[in-house]
Amino acid sequence: MNSAVKGHHLVDVAVKEWGAVVHALGTGIQTIQCRKHAPRAGEFLFYPTFSYFDSQPWEHKFKPQYYDLVRKVGQAVVEAARNDRIEMRYYAECVEVLPTDSRRILNLSSEYIWSDEHVESYALRGAVIWLLRVYRLPHGAPVGATLRSGDILYYRHFPKVDISGAIPVLNDAEFEGRKKKILQALH
């Protein structure tokens, strides 16, 4: 069963995230985010960025099996930004915020596209895991390339986006199975 978003529902906050990670979240490869703090909003859109792709070399940040995906998505987001055609295509609900440390987070290695070294270095600075239920929007929300690289995590400079009809990337059973696996791996 898929629980689509019903009724008129508007969202006006986005989380800036590397385009390759947004793609992984939007295709079900990944259901978690590793961040320094809990999210300020329980629901948000994803604004895809390409700053990781601009920094060379970027390969050490991702697992080798995802290099082609990272390169393809990075090039597409760069091109979209060049043409001022960035679109937000995914919405997420933060289902749980889970404490972790640099040892336990590696138990989740199958749940993310980043390299273990990148995740471990991030976790050493103090991190939490956002367990996300991600939805594909029925229509992309064009916002242009108004957001540049930097440390801003949240973005609100766009009209509210109606997410009615958004479909979960993972069906209910798949999501609950992944959630159970993640919770077990962290405890």
Image (cartoon, rainbow, N blue to C red):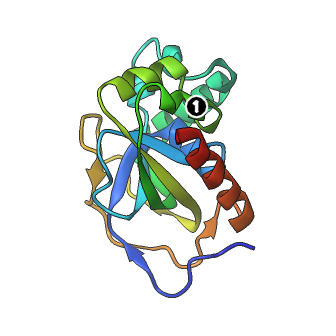
Closer-to-camera residue (119/156) = 119
Secondary element type, mark 1: helix
Q: Is residue 176 above or below residue 124?
A: below
Query: Mark 1 = which residue?
Result: 107
**Residue at figure coordinates x 61%, y 22% from the top left:** 63
List x then y, in percent, for residue 182. Answer: 59, 46
List x then y, in percent, for residue 91. Answer: 49, 62
Outermost residue toward the top in this view: 57
Counting every numbered tag in the picture gives 1
- Please give left or right for residue 145 compared with residue 96 in the image: left
Whether residue 113 appears in this view of the structure is no
Residue kind at label 1, given as amino acid type: Asn
List x then y, in percent, for residue 78. Answer: 46, 34
List x then y, in percent, for residue 57. Answer: 46, 11
Q: Is residue 63 above or below residue 148?
A: above
Q: Is residue 5 above or below residue 69?
A: below
**Residue at figure coordinates x 30%, y 63% from the top left:** 158
Name the quadrant of the N terminus.
bottom right
